[in-house]
Amino acid sequence: MRKIGFFCAVVSFTAVVHTAPSVTLIDGNPILRKPDPDFLYAADPAAEVYDGKVYLYCSRDVEGASGYSTMQDYMILESSDLKTWINHGVVLKPRTDRGFEYADGQMNAPDAAYKDGWYYFYFPYAKTHVGVAKSRSPVGPWETAVPDKICTIFDPTVFIDDDGQAYIYGSDNKKNIGERGRHMFGAKLKDNMLELDGGWVRLTEEPVSEAVHVFKRNRKYYFHARVDKDTKYWMADEPLPQFAKPMGVLAPDAPDAPNHASAVEFKGEWYFFYHRGDVNGGSYHCRSACFEKMTFRADGSIEPIVYSLGE
């Protein structure tokens, strides 16, 4: 590896079934390469582990984009070994798929969660409204789960605790919740995964920019988000703390991209997924998904991520 440094009625309509996925074998980052069949710019990777496989739920950057207004659909990558990746391509087009008529505007970073036999795909539209699709499969086909937004938050991410309680998180960037500013917020979800169960709780004293994500390890809750250029993280003993303890920088500024990351445990190791714009002829608005191993210290804190590329 070359190191380069630091409410809700359910409405059921089936979405469009897409073409057969392509397969790529990687040695280092990025996950998809420009010469690959059906190459797409995969941004904002939200990693989930289902049945021994990693799934990345990604937004898609349009080739040649000079801004984010062209973000309007979602794609999925899948791997059982983090070397061979299945590119399922674009699997959800809320602007055109039947049943999602309520969704329009810019569609940035999504997330997914599984509960009681259903996979739920949480996607933002009009930047801050959160829509939901559902499927019996982690890759679709997807059908609408709601007739309208379930809440308003920026960069939604969903976490299900060991007791089955689900939570949704994000920041109030672009849409203030309570006092003015940009902070990390979280709330409980009802068992149906489609409605808030109570109000929002502010989780950080410090302001955050965007890209909130949450995971749990050894009974400790980790919250990370982009703060200015860096990704910083906090720790707590509960999923909705007031306030989580700031721990410092988790990862430096992503190369030529505003960082957006997620973290999962897979086969006994922890991995940090992110995107960068300096590969595949990309840019700040044409990003590619990547990943690195995460290392935890004895006290539970995390060694800062070092970005790498394949040879």
Image (cartoon, rainbow, N blue to C red):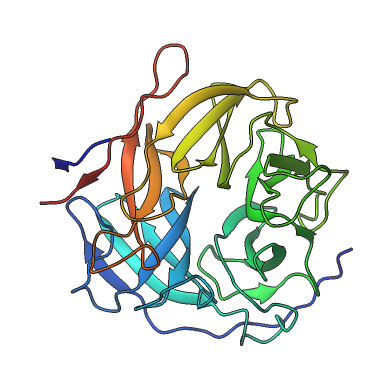
Instruction: Note whether residue 193 is visible.
Output: yes
Q: Farthest residue to the top: give it.
A: 299
27 and 143: which is toward the camera: 27
Q: Quadrant of the N terminus?
A: top left
- As drawn, 293 above or below 128: above
Please state the horizontal and vertical placement of residue 29, each as a whole percent of the image.
Answer: 24, 53
- As drawn, 165 above or below 238: below
286 and 191: which is toward the camera: 286
Instruction: Note whether residue 50 is visible.
Output: no
Name which residue lies at 76% across and 58% down: 152
- As drawn, 182 above or below 32: above
Please state the horizontal and vertical placement of residue 187, each as a whole percent of the image.
Answer: 77, 42
Q: Farthest residue to the front: give it.
A: 180
Q: Quadrant of residue 36?
A: bottom left
Name which residue lies at 52% across and 31% down: 233
- As drawn, 206 above or below 211: above
Give the side of residue 106 with respect to residue 58, left or right.
right
Name which residue lies at 38% across and 39% down: 271
Please state the horizontal and vertical placement of residue 294, each as a whole percent of the image.
Answer: 36, 32
Give the side of residue 285 with respect to residue 34, left or right.
right
Q: Quadrant of residue 10?
A: bottom right
